[in-house]
Amino acid sequence: MVTARELSLGLEQTRMKLNKAITITLILIFVGINLFTRFYGLENSPASLGFDEAALGYNAYSLSKTGRDEWGYRLPLSLRSFNDYKPALYSYLAVPFVRVFGLSQASTRMPSAFLGTISALFTLLILKQLTKSKGLPVIIAALFVTLSPWRLHFSRVALETNISSSFFVIMAWCLINRHKNRLYRLGVVLFGLLSIYSYHSARLAVPILIVLVAIDSKKKIIANAFLVLSILVLSLPIFAANGLSVMTRFSQTNLFSHFYPYSPMEVIGAANPWLSLTNHPLYYLTGHLFGRIVAYLSPSNLSVTIYPWVAKSAMVIIDNGMLGFLGSLFFIIGLISLLRRVRKNANLRLLLYWIIAGALPAALTWEWFHPFRALNLFPALDLIAALGLLRLFGKIFSFKSVILKTSALLGLLVILVMSVLFNWLNEINYSVWENNGEFQPGGFREGTTLLMSLADKYPVIYVDTPHAQSYIFFLLYGKLDPKIIQETNRQYRLPEGFPSSVFNFGKFVYKKFNWPGDRFSHNYIYYTQSEIKEEEYQDVAGTALYKVIDPFGRWTATIITKD
Amino acid sequence: MLNYPPTFEQLIFPLTASWQLWLVRFLTLSLVFVTLLQVSRWLAERAKVWFWFLVLLSPVSFLLVMSYPISAIKLALVIFVIKKTGRTNLAKTAGLILIALLLLTINIKIIKEIPPIMPRLSFPVLQAELTDRFNKEYLLQPGNYIPLAIKRIAYNKYFFLIKDIGEETLRFAAVETLFFGENHPLSQKSIPVFFWSEFGLFLLALWVWSKNKKNAIDKVGLLLSAAVIYFLTTPGQAYSRHLITFLLLAVIMAEALPRLVSGNKPLRLVTYGLLFLALYGGLAHFVDRLKRPGYWLDNRPLVYQIYFDSIPTEKYDQVFVADLFGYAAEYCRYYKKDCRRFTFANFQMTELSPRENALYIGFNGNFFGVDPIRNFDRLDDLVIDSHRIGFIHSAFIRDNVANGYGQRIIFGVRTDKDETK
């Protein structure tokens, strides 16, 4: 095991060794801060649930009430949801929160926030083990990286990839300690499986990491092979549950078909690319693949570059990037520190294998940099950034002048506090403005509450919205009985029988809003996101109009009742 | 590729003929050679040949000589200052300040472009950014309450200044620009600085450097600082902001390569494999550049070449040239010599009454109106103010060089009077 001195962090000069009671207190504070930053204001930030978040939340509600998902499948391993077959583990983990706190935005997000905190704790434990240091700087470094923009962002949204990443961290910790006793090896299998059952990417990332570590260790081959085999065998049920849909999705997103024939078409012309001597496809394909792994080490990608496919998704972290500017600077320092010692230290090599295993599943898809699919690797980047910060602490402690040392240390701590606070403020309030896009449409939370309070006396609720799959918001925010949707979905159980993403259920009927015609009908309630001219409704008998205002003060939808 | 038209940097010199352009290129070649020779002198004897291999394989060297004399001068100046800088910290700081001042002066006074770091250093801009944040967060209903005093710790001009400078500096570390220009994820308009396999060489080189402190040459630290300064103070295409980085990376790899090729067998195999792929990358990109120079190189010189070198303009009393990039007068001098009949302004045909026996040269947007949403391509006659504009020549230019103005360059003349009668 490497020591802080071997890592060249210079921490041996800190003289900040802490006794057990202080260490435990500091760890409790560490957990408390992580917990608070993830749970505070979870109901209001992000302001609205995304489609996938709502699906996970409502299926948790459905499972807790009926033991079946929205499609009526009993205790499924995979949720059919929008025909995208999400791994069901997130919803199962949300069941206790939904039971205790009721179905809400916050309870839907709580598993992510909770496991995000657990992941932070295990990151600290791994860092302590990597550096063999018990001083305060390690806790500060761990606190800084566990409050990084990506950690806060993904922990405050209900996403399967975040819980998969959290289980992955625990598995990595068990993997580092696997030689200590059998319990840790069991931990590798258990948490590896939990990661696999949480999100698709882990199905590749978990076995790859264990195989790379096993190859590296060159001893206890049988024990390591047993680990890999156990995981492969025990993960078969999830492959059986949604393997086909995952393969279909992969066929649409993979790098190999997207860029074929890899060589630039204008250069090779109509000739067979595989016969090209000067611009052979294999050269370009290898470059694509290599670049997609390297992209996750690019400091600019980790801090400032926002790709178009990221900007339009739940992955985007406004004004910050995944690690933030300071985290990315520490990452560069940490990477150099890591390279210095990687040859002599197996645990540090594990970080490199972790990067390869985490990046590879995402690298096989066409997008250059896709944090969502590569979230398993980001804790490894955090650890490298923490090593960088510790290296900086070490450098400051080596200053001979006390004044210089104190002022440098104070300056660094002030910037760390500002940076962490900025990450948090940016996430919980400001980014709401930018994040609410097509994937987190505003207005449903406010609109559904009002709609349901008015809807009792009407036999039909008409809905007119441009959002596909918007039914899930009415189900969740209206806390509708799961039996209603299960009844409707039974009609579409076969995949080919699914007519479109928009279908009627219960009293809800999807219908294009047409006031000139509808004004003569009676006894209905309308939820519409079409543009409305208030004056057209003022003098129509039996008509009432209610504006739905989203968190930004914008008139986002209208509810019209006609008696 | 050899006949690529002169760039703006070349026309800063008062060129009026092709032989003068080649003279500038020859002088640039001499300057670049002397500069590279100077850098190679900082390296160990066995590393020199690798340094020359790496820099000559890169398209940057070729392009620097062929098209960018001012950049070559800046490069030479930076290397000269680094050469003369002493070893004390004070001398190094003074050297870096001098480099920053020289670069800022050349970029602002001669090239007349604002360095990308400058807008980031403005306190009024930062203040506006902060006010916007406070306002938005205040308006959010329901929002998450945070006491103002807490917010102020992070939401202040000084932190935002540090953050903005930090972010701009991190753009420097874009491996995509430096090593993956061949298949850049954003199809960035630039040329590859190094080929993708050379990133593998770079990682191996870092590993060698981190193992052996002895081989750290004194100038690398200065080169790194100068590379960051150069990046922050230089506007332009991505690769042109990385000219010092290009030398720095070549030095790092070259210094490590002798050790890598004399290492154990697997290491030798990997190194030679990567070198072979780099060589192949050089060949592949050379062929690519030959076949589609307009894809890789700055398109704006091509626009001016089409403007002034496509059709004879002598028979027109007046020629109106849409100057979208600001260098039309210099290009006119180069191609036409006598430019008295030429008017350079970004005209809008839909708002003008076309003159008799006048030629109008511009993009689609100059004739049909600007459309910022799409790059439209239109070539039907235009009726303006009861006159008809007929199009006598047109050329399509790839990529979106004139945003909102389309990708077609049009030569229009007034053909009839009172067409509508």
Image: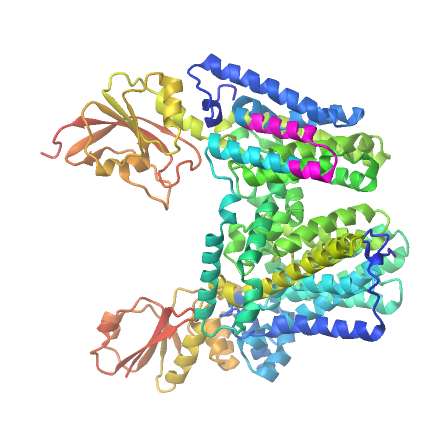
Q: Quadrant of the C terminus of chain A?
A: bottom left
Q: Position of residue A187 (x, y in %)?
A: 80, 68
Residue A289 drawn in magenta? no
| Extreme residue in the right direction | A219
Which quadrant of the view contains residue B280?
top right
Which range is magenta? B71-94
The answer to whether B266 appears left or right of A152 in the picture is: right
Q: Is residue A354 above or below residue A459?
A: above
Q: Nearer the viewer, residue B123 or B234?
A: B123
In screen coordinates, is A200 left or right of A184? Answer: left
Seen at 70% across and 59% down, the residue is A379
Q: Using the image as rendered, state which of residue B224 and residue B89 is in the foreground.
A: B89
Q: Quadrant of the N terminus of chain A?
A: bottom right
Rendered view: A213 above or below B369: below
Q: Nearer the viewer, residue A16 or B198?
A: A16
Residue beneath the point at 88% across and 51% down: A218
Residue B154 in picture, x, y percent from top left: 57, 63
The answer to whether residue A438 shows anywhere in this view is no
Look at 62% across and 79% down and name the residue there: A97
Residue B78 among magenta residues: yes
A373 over B86 or under it: above or below: below
Q: Is residue B326 something one can see in this rendering?
A: yes
Task: Give x and y (percent) for residue B34.
Answer: 65, 20
Nearest the camera: B240 or B111?
B111
Which of the 4 image quarters holds residue A227? Answer: bottom right
